[in-house]
Image (cartoon, rainbow, N blue to C red):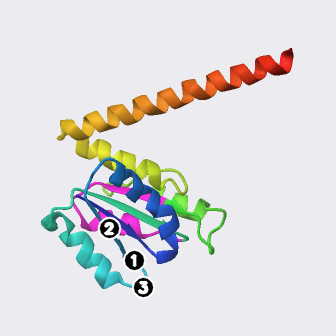
């Protein structure tokens, strides 16, 4: 099971992409708002107890100062994937990216691109897939489908380009 958490409900439009991937891969998850700054007690309880509730991977999205992923990682033995979110109070997203990326030694957070919740969902599946061959097979099919989409787009581009050159 994966936990998707975010610092604010305004982050949901980004974090939903992680949930969509987990749905596609048929991976169970829970999703909630856990603010490092506004609900520190809730964050502490969530992070320190997630592994006891059967959570295997945590995806944590936050904007602005973006302390949620790092604080959760400091309290949990689970892998944490940080999603920097471009928020209304953000400095072009760099504050979020650097807050999650620049963790001190001993407190790792796997960091995806700005608003990269889709990749966070895929990475969570890849982590879980280490011990789940069925999930690994779904990931292999997902990547094969991506390859096929690119090949089809290239064929279409080539066909359209031939028309343009006469």
Pinpoint residue 126: horizontal percent, then vertical percent.
Answer: 31, 42
Magenta stretch in the rendered image: 65-83
Q: Looking at the image, which residue is at 85% across and 16% down?
A: 165
Query: From the image, which quarter does the C terminus lie in?
Result: top right
Q: Is residue 106 magenta?
A: no
Q: Which residue is the site of mark 2? A: 72
Compared to 24, does 48 lie above or below?
below
Q: For this rendering, which residue is in front, 117 or 79? A: 117
Quarter residue 45 falls in? bottom left
Query: From the image, which quarter does the N terminus lie in?
Result: bottom left
Pinpoint residue 137: horizontal percent, then vertical percent.
Answer: 27, 33
Q: Is 116 situated left or right of 108 in this image? A: right
Q: Which residue is the site of mark 1? A: 36
Question: Which label sits on residue 38?
Answer: 3
Pinpoint residue 23: horizontal percent, then vertical percent.
Answer: 34, 54
Q: For this rendering, which residue is in front, 37 or 60? A: 60
Q: CA distance from mark 3 to mark 1?
A: 6 Å
Question: Which label sits on residue 129?
Answer: none
Compared to 105, does 33 lie above or below?
below
Helix, strand or loop at disc 1?
loop
Helix, strand or loop at disc 3?
loop
């Amino acid at each position: 099971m994966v936990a998707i958490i975010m610092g604010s409900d305004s982050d949901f439009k980004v974090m939903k992409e992680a949930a969509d991937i987990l749905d596609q891969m048929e991976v169970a998850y829970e999703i909630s708002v856990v603010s490092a700054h506004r609900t520190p007690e809730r964050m502490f309880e969530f992070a320190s107890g997630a592994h006891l509730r059967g959570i295997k991977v945590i995806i944590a999205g936050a904007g602005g100062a973006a302390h949620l992923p790092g604080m959760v990682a400091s309290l949990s033995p689970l892998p944490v994937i940080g999603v920097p979110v471009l928020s209304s109070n953000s400095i072009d997203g760099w504050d979020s990216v650097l807050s999650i990326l620049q963790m001190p030694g001993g407190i790792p957070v796997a960091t995806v691109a700005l608003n990269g919740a889709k990749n966070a969902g895929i990475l969570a599946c890849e982590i879980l897939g280490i011990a789940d061959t069925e999930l690994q097979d779904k990931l292999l099919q997902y990547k094969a489908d991506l390859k096929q989409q690119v090949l089809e787009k290239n064929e279409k581009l080539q066909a359209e380009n031939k028309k343009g050159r006469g």
